C-alpha cells in the first residue's frame, strides 16, 4: 500500500501576541518567527516522522523551493510536487497568544491552482488499495475524492478548514475515514457534543470510520461496530498550531501498520501532546523515537 498526501504547502509567519487582534485595533507583536507549514506539508512530515513512506502531491509557487527541500530532507517522495511559476506560494499569518492558542489567516496561492488535469496525472501512478489523504486547502477536493474512489483507493479526509463547499460536498459518502475536530464536527452536523456529532456522522455515512478530537476531552473513534475514547496528556502549551496535523499523520501511520484502535489513539495522542510543547508547525512535530522515549514522562501526566 502506498500513501499519497495530496495537500497544501505554505510559508508560515507566526506572530507572538498578548492577545488576538480585535476589530479596529493596532497591536504590536512581541516577535516574529518564520516556519514552513500548510496542513498538507505538516501531515506528510508527521507521517514520515511516524515511520511511514509517503508521497506528497501539491503545488508551490516560484518562491517555494524551500518547501520542496524540506520534504526531501524528511525523505518524502516529491515526484508529484508541481510548480506554478505565475502564482505565489500559499502562506499563513498566524497569531499565537500567551496561552499558546492560535488564530490563522490563510492565503491559498498555488494551493488553489490544482487542476483536474494535475489530479489525473498524479492518480495515474496509484492503484486500488493505496491510501489518499486529503485536507481542504487545495482546489478540486471533490474531484480527487471521485477519482480516487473510482480507482478503489482508501480515502482519508481531514475536513479542515471547514467551509460551505465542503459541508455541501456530495462525494463525502465516498470517504472511508474522517479525522476531524469538534469545530469541524459541529459544522458538518450542527451538534455540539462528541457523542452527538459521531451519531449524526455515522447515520449519514454508515460505512465510514470516524476519529474525533475534542481538545481537553481527548479523542474518540467510532464505526458501525466499535467505539473507543482516549484521554489527554497534561503538558505545557506553547503553540497548538500543528497538534491536529501531528495527530492525523501519526494515526494514519499506525492504521497502515495495522495496529489496534487503542494503540493508534494512544500513539497519536502522545505525538500531538509533544507537538504543542514547541513553537511552530512542521518544526514541532516529534519523531517516532521521541514519542517512544517520552512515554514514561507522558504516562505520569496522563489525565
Image (tube, grey):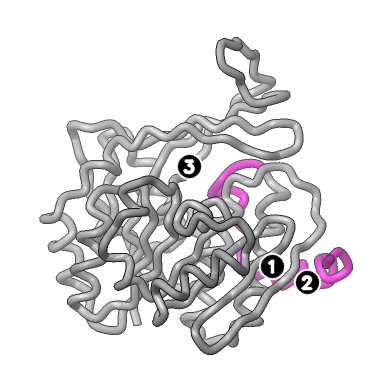
Q: Position of residue 101 (x, y in %)?
A: 67, 39
Which label was assigned to residue 291? 1
| Above or below 67: residue 252 | below
Name the residue at 53% across, 72% down: 199
Q: Which residue is at a point 52% across and 64% down the rendered structure image?
A: 248
SS under mark 1:
helix
- At x 65%, y 14%, the residue is 28
Residue 166 seen in the figure: yes
- Placement of 133 over or under 32, stated as above or below: below
The percent position of residue 212, horizontal first and vertical second, equals 57, 65
Dominant SS of magenta comes to helix
- Crowding at dot 3, Cα within 10 Å, few <14 / some 14-19 / many 20+, comes out as many
Instruction: Assign a secondary structure to mark 3.
Output: strand
Q: Are marks 2 and 1 in contact (CB under 8 Å)?
A: yes
CA distance for labels 2 and 3:
28 Å
On screen, residue 8 versus residue 100, left or right, reads left
Instruction: Name the residue that disc number 2 marks.
Output: 295
* Tag shown at residue 186: none
Residue 245 can be seen, yes or no: no
Q: State which region is magenta.
A: 279-303
- From the image, tell me which residue sits under label 3: 36
Q: Quadrant of the C terminus?
A: bottom right
Marked residue nearer the N-terminal end (1 or 3): 3
Q: Position of residue 260 (x, y in %)?
A: 59, 87
Q: Give the side of residue 184 with respect to residue 65, left or right.
A: right
Image quadrant of residue 22? top right
Indicate which disc, 2 or 3, sits on the residue closer to the N terminus.
3
Q: Residue at x 57, y 86 (%)?
A: 226
Amino acid at each position: 500500500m502506498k500513501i499519497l498526501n495530496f495537500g497544501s504547502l505554505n510559508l508560515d509567519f507566526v506572530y507572538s501576541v498578548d492577545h488576538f487582534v480585535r476589530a479596529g485595533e493596532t497591536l504590536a507583536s512581541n516577535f516574529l518567527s518564520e516556519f514552513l507549514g500548510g496542513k498538507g506539508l505538516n501531515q506528510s512530515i508527521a507521517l514520515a516522522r511516524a515511520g511511514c513512506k509517503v508521497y506528497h502531491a501539491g503545488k508551490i509557487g516560484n518562491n517555494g523551493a524551500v518547501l520542496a527541500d524540506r520534504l526531501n530532507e524528511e525523505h518524502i517522495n516529491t515526484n508529484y510536487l508541481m510548480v506554478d511559476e505565475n502564482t505565489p506560494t500559499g502562506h499563513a499569518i498566524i497569531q499565537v497568544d500567551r496561552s499558546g492558542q492560535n488564530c490563522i489567516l490563510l492565503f491559498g496561492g498555488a494551493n488553489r491552482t490544482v487542476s483536474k488535469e494535475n489530479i489525473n496525472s498524479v492518480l495515474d501512478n496509484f492503484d486500488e488499495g493505496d491510501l489518499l489523504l486529503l485536507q481542504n486547502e487545495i482546489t478540486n477536493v471533490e474531484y480527487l475524492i471521485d477519482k480516487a474512489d473510482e480507482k478503489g483507493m482508501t480515502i482519508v479526509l481531514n475536513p479542515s478548514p471547514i467551509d460551505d463547499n465542503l459541508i455541501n460536498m456530495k462525494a463525502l459518502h465516498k470517504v472511508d475515514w474522517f479525522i476531524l475536530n469538534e469545530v469541524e464536527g459541529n459544522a458538518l452536523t450542527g451538534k455540539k457534543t462528541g457523542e452527538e456529532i459521531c451519531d449524526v456522522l455515522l447515520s449519514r455515512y454508515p460505512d465510514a470510520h470516524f476519529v474525533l478530537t475534542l481538545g481537553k476531552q481527548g479523542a474518540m473513534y467510532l464505526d458501525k461496530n466499535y467505539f473507543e475514547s482516549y484521554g489527554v496528556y497534561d503538558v505545557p502549551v506553547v503553540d497548538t498550531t500543528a497538534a491536529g496535523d501531528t495527530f492525523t499523520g501519526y494515526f494514519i501511520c499506525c492504521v497502515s501498520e495495522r495496529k489496534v484502535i487503542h494503540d493508534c489513539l494512544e500513539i497519536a495522542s502522545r505525538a500531538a501532546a509533544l507537538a504543542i510543547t514547541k513553537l511552530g508547525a512542521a518544526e514541532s512535530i516529534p519523531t517516532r523515537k521521541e514519542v517512544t522515549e517520552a512515554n514514561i514522562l507522558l504516562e505520569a501526566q496522563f489525565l
